[in-house]
Amino acid sequence: MNGFASKATDSLVLLEGAKLNARLRPLAFATLAALSFGTAHAQDTIKVGILHSLSGTMAISETTLKDTMLMLIEQQNAKGGLLGKKLEAVVVDPASDWPLFAEKARELIQVNKVAAVFGCWTSVSRKSVLPVFEELDSLLFYPVQYEGEESSKNVFYTGAAPNQQAIPAVDYLMNEVGVERWVLAGTDYVYPRTTNRILEAYLKSKGVAESDIMINYTPFGHSDWQSIIAQIKAFGSAGKKTAVVSTINGDANVPFYKELGNQGISAEDIPVVAFSVGEEELSGIDTTPLVGHLAAWNYFMSIESDVNDEFIGSWLEFIKNEERVTNDPMEAHYIGFNMWAEAVTKAGTTDPKAVQEAIIGVSVPNLTGGVATMMPNHHITKPVFIGEIQDDGQFEVVWQTAGTVVGDAWSDFLPGSRDITADWMPPLSCGNYNVKTGMCSGQNYE
Amino acid sequence: MIKLAAVVALIVGSLAACLPAGATEEELARGIAELAAAESYADKAAAAAVIGASRHPRAEAVLTALLEGELYTTRADARLVTAADVEGGYAIRDAVTDEALGTVGRRAVSRVSVNNQLRGTLRSVIAGLRLTHEDPAERRAAIAKVGESSDLAMVATLEQLLATEEHGGVRDAIEMAVATLNLDSPDNALRLAAIETVGSNSSAHVRAKLTALAGNAALDETTRAAAARSLDRIEQRVALYELVQTAFFGLSLGSILVLAAIGLSVTFGIMGVINMAHGELMMLGAYTTYVVQTLMPNAIGASLFVAMPLAFLVAALVGIAIERGIVRTLYARPLETLLATFGVSLVLQQTVRSIFSPLNRTVVTPDWLSGSIEIVPGLAITLNRLYILAFSLLVFAALLVVLRYTRFGLEMRAVTQNRAMARAMGVRTDRVDALTFGLGAGIAGLAGVALSQLTNVGPNLGQAYIVDSFMVVVFGGVGSLWGTLTSGLTLGVVSKLIEPAAGAVMAKIFVLLFLIVFIQKRPRGLFPQKGRAAEA
């Protein structure tokens, strides 16, 4: 039975169940018929799915990524689109609700028939959509720094893996700032938990004692930071230089930094390095009490390069607001989108399998004057920058890596993942390959 | 790493002898030139040390500008300037002479960047220059800072200051600073005396030094024992302060719970209506604050006082609308009321999302509400929480006054105790119902104003507090104001006592479990209503 007829039959069943008035039934039937016809004929565009929270606790971070994708698609269309067709953006709002992410992903792939999806922020949202993308064999470009321990055939990780953000940040604090006591504070979900496991293992491997590490988790949207910050203050008064490594996500950051300021903890006493706080999260709060606190990213809006100036210029023009900012996940989408476009052009089709093969090895310029390359483990090469918050919400780079760092999906510091490598090129074609036992396991093995 | 602060201090200390004025100018000029040419943070720190050592009257101004991020170099001639934001560019002044140099475009200057380590060094250098500042508070701060520099050469400088200092508080500060520095003294007697004196100083620096001394096997028994004793004194005092602080945190959390729950207690208690939209009424109060601030951007402090009555009114009107529209028609059908008010809460959330935006709105905290106040050295209380605690108690007192001394309060109490009898006595119960609901809602609006200062203002603000409000009301006894106060404060303090040990989430779980067990024993709460009508 073709789609049209089966849809009509289902609708009839629904109408029966709803006990609609006999006169209304044909009218409803006719409307449904018109709608089914409508969706079948829009095949002249290539659809691109945008799966970012536009409401809820993560909206503060994710809304700007939706706008970035719209800009990138508009720019690509101005260049003539892709494979001779125009690109069409399909935007959905999963509302910071993790199960809804999976539903919306399915809707994008099955109903809207998108060629690729750019989306997600929290790792729990990514884990939630992972089975959907693997079942329906579509593509997800994930632009946010995350905890690693994953490499899916259907996901391209354009954000930082721990060795491209967390580890260099800890190295900076240990070597340049002389930190000896560590507070690992995070929101309670998979990303901070796994990152803190990796960091704890890393710190211990560098000789830090267990008593010099304090770990703390809070729920999403937590706003009463009094006790925790008093604890951090007390922990930092033991005579050794103390720093906080923060994996706090979403709008809980706003009351966290406010309370830090209120309790008088300056960045010179106890610096806080955050992995999920960028220009976007800081715009809209007064950053004067935060001056000197740090963030580790692979891009800052304040980095001077011609490509960056151009990007910022076209972004401000697109969004029609001079006060808006650019940040690292936006650069990740920029890189991911350009890599996808190049792979599609190379493969001559948007078919996911072809794109997966074509995209490995693709190199596009990043926004800091270098180049990003897609590696066989579906991660990319990125430079690392450590920046200090300024009083205008921008970051001042205080340290950077000499060149780019290759993203490592499986951390070398965790006993389980030390022996695992990801390589999606033949002959391995596995995201979870154990070099010691020679076996491919976990998700996506063929 | 060079201890630049120590280098500076040595130079500064030795400058107790006068230098001819020309040398000061030269020194300053050399430092300025080095700073303008400096590439790395270490170079900037060295240049700052030279500027500080010159003891030129302008040295402090230049270094403070650098610390605050207000020092720039002109791209054209690499000149050090301070820049103020003006329309379309910067108004620049020469960094040394403060001579106005006109206005330039934004790209014509670049800021001299500072990092944390450099800021630390700058603060030490500036403290050295501020030892003779005219403001005693500045002198005390500078002296305290110098005391923590671990530089013994400063002892001489500080003792010279003591000879000329008249202000009592500053003299005490000098003596403490000298003692702190003398903890590193090679002279045993001096060190022992110092250890005794610093016992009254709870700073982290002193604690670290005493711990090091107590554990240093190279020192003699008396010194180590004395250090251990002083450390004990300090740690006992710190433990006491931490207890006081935890109690304060608990009271402040409790005061918010009380504010949130008291409106619910009024409506639940008097009318037996479960209002699931209570959280959204608080959210409306918070948004009213946001709107008032948008309309009064230049008077943020006053905006809060304007927002309070407005938030009360807005929430009260919405409350009366809910009562008239929904609660009245569903009278004596509690389950339907619960569902209907839940629907109202969803409608209110979506209305706010549509009018404003799904994203959080920024509510600015006025200056007098930010920061903390130091009660004793080592014990600081954050101001916003203190004011909100006072505000809650004020609202509670006002509500008590309304209930006890006004006609309306009398009618409310009558309707609560025996509705039929009150009607027979001529009380217009339907009007009392509407106004009571309005009162409860209005107080929720006031709670929203307080919350806007503490947490993110977004459409979901109410969701975070509705369950807590019900918990407080159920625990305290429905309809009892004193019950709500007691239960709110108790739950707050208990949460905060558990939190350091078990974490924020587990603390909430324990409180909930405790409540469930308590309700088994006393289903009517701490202070249940008495009387035949209530027990009917």
Image: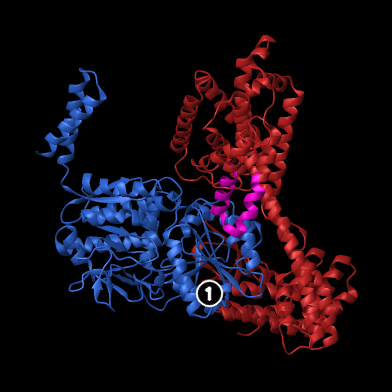
Q: Is residue B358 above or below residue A360?
A: above
B192 vs B232, nearest the viewer: B232
Main secondary-structure element of the magenta-colored stretch: helix
Magenta stretch: residue A406 in it? no
Q: Residue at x 66, y 40 (%)?
A: B487
Residue with the mark numbered 1: A173
Closer-to-camera residue (B396/A38): B396
Q: Which chain is red?
A: B
Q: Residue at x 60, y 74 (%)?
A: B117
Q: Position of residue A325 (x, y in %)?
A: 44, 56
Question: Residue A328: percent from the left, percent from the top?
Answer: 40, 62
Left or right position of B126 against A142: right
- Front-lying residue, B389 or B501: B501
Amino acid type, label 1: Leu
The part of the chain drawn in magenta is B491-515
Residue B400 percent across, percent down from the top left: 73, 30
Q: Is residue A365 left or right of residue B517?
A: left
Q: What residue lies at 16% left-to-right and 62% top-to-bottom?
A: A354
Which corner quadrant of the image does residue A409 belong to? Answer: bottom left
Q: Quadrant of residue B438?
A: top right
Q: Secondary structure at mark 1?
A: helix
The tint of chain A in the picture is: blue
| Figure check: A191 above or below B6 | above
Judging depth in this view, the residue of B498 and B189 nearest the camera is: B498
